Image: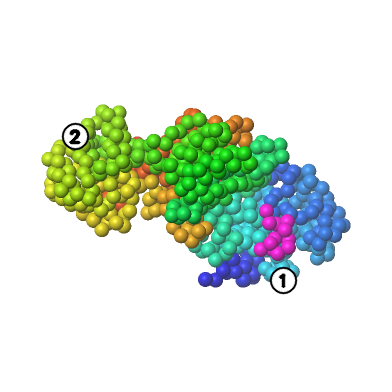
């Protein structure tokens, strides 16, 4: 594939020679917020340089003192923030006989003032005239002009030219003209926020061969995938309007963290090298992706410990981290027995810990939280869907005689009772005993249940459902746990599962933008598709980042900051933190239909039928106050 930037910059006569005629008169655009014709200053009315103004006042590009009186006067006006007056001085200079260095300085400054005054067409025409009159092409464009062209084309709505010039400016900065590095990186990032969602992936594909733009697109994709990213921008205002605030934001939070501004530390305990190593690595990669997306500096420092399946190692690792590294919080482990030991040590050391255990028996409190996919969170999703969306009042549970099966029975009974619903059948079976399984099927067949929960794997569930009569299968809606979250395997027995609803903590085929954008960024970063543990790691990472930054900003403990976070719509569903730090999760469910798999949030179908606006297959941010969201750098 030809490099996208080269496609636009090779034909310099097209890029530079036709700017003037193609932009005069300007194309009709969205109405500006005010008339610029009499504006003296830029929108910000600030004396600070614009992001593309990387030159030194009173000096030319080679570093020699300027002598032209009009240019010097313009620079003096510019220092006072009087851009209209500065522009008039630079235009006056252009009419005089100038040296090559002075002509370059005058053209660059005049074009810059036009752009600062939000007249991008005139800025581009000024640059075009300068290069055309001197028979110069793209090879003569230095970093300062590259940046100006990037910002001007971006403001003018030409994304292809804007990205081409941002890429060139960044390459020039990398090769020696370092003053343009930050302006190109931040400018490209801010400009990418203006690209509509419906065009974003096609633009990303076009620029996949350009390393700089490809990386910037990946970060923007992750920003959009994370809660708090606002894709809707008022295009009446320049995309760089918050440039200075973006740069200053890191300093504000980092200095509030401590007087010396050290990087916040987060401990991570996972099994990375034993038989559960792949689970730990997936979680770690998702977590790291969230940390990388945090724009605040200094970056959060991760202290990762491989604890395997050894409870004593987990215990000692927590004590070592708390004593030496003093982390804001420790995340992990995944395995319950190991997590219990880690939690005990965290309580002793008064260090917050977020466990990834999914066990109902795991004890929280005293600074210890749990974020795993618990039995309760799965049952809540299924009962809400069945009761609210399908008006089911009579339930059965057919379950294996295992500890996990018993746990689902107890939780299921409690949830039904709390909603005034009825359990009409409680039928255990021994998975390895065919007779036992058939007896459970017969009891289900003769019951008056409207839905049945089967907390077992797909293979056992197929045996159960396929032995029901066609009339019973039509009457009783199957409900499945996350053990059914394998659409490929479900599809092999789709007739048996038709109408079934199962919990999907992470549905890779989701049409939700946040899931699609996360998946693309994860694939780009790690060259493989994400699974639930990677997605969970990413969501937990976003919670941790926001709690750490809020704790620094508000001068409160991590646990207090965590409890104050707003409800979060992540790639694995909704997460809410209740004081003191009790984490609750709401998973999406998937229904098996003749047309395929349909994902939705529990209860959304009932809302739709009741006339509540919204898309029942995509409820992104539906329950988030738009004024108070978990922020992310992506």
* Neighbour tally class for label 2: few under 14, some 14-19, many 20 plus, Cα within 10 Å: some
Q: Is residue 390 left or right of residue 130?
A: left
Q: Which mark, by number, is residue 135?
A: 1
Outermost residue, front side = 312
Q: Nearer the viewer, residue 589 or 227?
A: 589
User: Would you identify the image quadrant in which residue 4 lies?
Assistant: bottom right
Residue situated in front as seen by the camera: 343 or 559: 343
Q: Seen in the image, is 309 located left or right of residue 68? A: left
- The answer to whether residue 20 is seen in the rendering is no
Q: Is residue 436 magenta?
A: no
Which residue is drawn at the image coordinates 42% and 42% (left, top)? Answer: 336
Where residue 276 appears, as percent x and y from the top left, is 44, 52
Mark 2 residue element: strand
Residues at circles 2 and 1 in contact by the CB criterion of under 8 Å: no
* x 77%, y 47%: residue: 78
Determine whether, in the image, residue 412 is placed left or right of residue 287: left
Q: Which residues are magenta?
A: 171-182
Q: Which mark is residue 424?
A: 2
Q: Which mark is residue 417?
A: none
Q: Residue at x 34, y 47 (%)?
A: 482
Look at the image and tell me whether residue 433 can be seen. yes
Q: Earlier in the sequence, mark 2 or mark 1?
A: 1
Q: Does the stretch in magenta take in 180?
A: yes
Q: Nearer the viewer, residue 189 or 237?
A: 189
Judge whether 92 appears above or below 442 on screen.
Answer: below
Query: Does the magenta stretch mainly form a helix, a strand or a loop?
Result: helix
């Amino acid at each position: 594939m030809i490099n996208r930037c080269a496609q636009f910059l090779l034909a310099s006569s097209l890029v530079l020679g036709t700017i003037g005629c193609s932009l005069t008169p300007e194309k009709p655009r969205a109405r500006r917020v005010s008339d610029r014709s009499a504006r003296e200053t830029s929108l910000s009315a600030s004396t600070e340089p614009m992001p593309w103004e990387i030159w030194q006042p009173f000096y030319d590009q080679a570093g020699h003192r300027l002598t032209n009186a009009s240019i010097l006067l313009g620079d003096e006006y510019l220092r006072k923030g009087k851009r209209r007056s500065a522009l008039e001085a630079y235009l006056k200079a252009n009419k005089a006989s100038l040296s090559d260095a002075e002509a370059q300085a005058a053209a660059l400054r005049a074009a810059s003032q036009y752009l600062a005054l939000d007249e991008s067409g005139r800025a581009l025409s000024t640059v075009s005239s300068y290069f055309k009159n001197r028979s110069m092409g793209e090879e003569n464009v230095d970093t300062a002009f590259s940046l100006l062209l990037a910002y001007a084309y971006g403001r003018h709505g030409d994304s292809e030219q804007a990205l081409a010039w941002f890429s060139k400016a960044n390459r020039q900065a990398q090769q020696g003209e370092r003053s343009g590095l930050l302006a190109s990186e931040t400018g490209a990032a801010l400009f990418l926020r203006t690209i509509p969602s419906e065009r974003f992936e096609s633009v990303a594909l076009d620029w996949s061969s350009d390393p700089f733009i490809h990386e910037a697109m990946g970060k923007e994709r992750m920003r959009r995938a994370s809660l708090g990213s606002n894709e809707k921008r008022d295009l009446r205002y320049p995309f760089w309007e918050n440039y200075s605030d973006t740069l200053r934001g890191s300093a504000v939070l980092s200095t509030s963290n401590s007087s010396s501004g050290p990087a916040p530390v987060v401990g991570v305990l996972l099994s990375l090298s034993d038989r559960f190593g792949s689970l730990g690595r997936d979680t770690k990669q998702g977590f790291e992706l969230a940390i990388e997306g945090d724009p605040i500096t200094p970056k959060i420092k991760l202290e990762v410990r491989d604890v395997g399946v050894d409870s004593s190692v987990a215990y000692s690792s927590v004590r070592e981290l708390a004593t030496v590294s003093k982390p804001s919080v420790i995340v992990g482990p995944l395995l319950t027995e190991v997590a219990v030991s880690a939690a005990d040590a965290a309580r002793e050391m008064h260090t917050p810990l977020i466990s990834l255990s999914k066990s109902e028996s795991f004890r929280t409190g005293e600074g210890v939280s749990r974020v795993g996919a618990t039995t309760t969170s799965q049952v809540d999703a299924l009962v809400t869907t069945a009761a609210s969306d399908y008006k089911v009042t009579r339930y059965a549970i057919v379950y294996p005689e295992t500890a996990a099966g018993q746990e689902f029975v107890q939780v299921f009974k409690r949830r039904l009772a709390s909603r005034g619903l009825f359990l009409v059948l409680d039928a255990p079976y021994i998975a390895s005993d065919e007779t036992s399984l058939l007896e459970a099927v017969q009891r289900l067949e003769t019951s008056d249940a409207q839905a049945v929960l089967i907390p077992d794997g797909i293979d056992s569930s197929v045996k159960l459902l396929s032995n029901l009569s066609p009339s019973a299968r039509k009457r009783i809606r199957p409900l499945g746990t996350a053990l059914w979250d394998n659409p490929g395997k479900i599809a092999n027995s789709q007739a048996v599962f038709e109408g079934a609803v199962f919990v999907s903590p992470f549905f890779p085929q989701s049409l939700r933008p946040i899931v699609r954008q996360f998946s693309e960024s994860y694939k780009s970063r790690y060259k493989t598709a994400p699974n639930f543990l990677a997605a969970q790691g990413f969501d937990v990472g976003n919670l941790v980042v926001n709690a750490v930054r809020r704790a620094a900003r508000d001068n409160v403990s991590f646990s207090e900051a965590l409890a104050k976070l707003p409800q979060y719509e992540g790639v694995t569903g909704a997460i809410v933190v209740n004081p003191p730090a009790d984490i609750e999760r709401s998973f999406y469910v998937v229904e098996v239909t003749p047309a395929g798999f349909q994902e939705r949030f529990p209860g959304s179908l009932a809302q739709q039928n009741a006339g509540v606006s919204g898309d029942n297959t995509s409820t992104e941010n539906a329950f988030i106050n738009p004024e108070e969201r978990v922020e992310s750098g992506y």
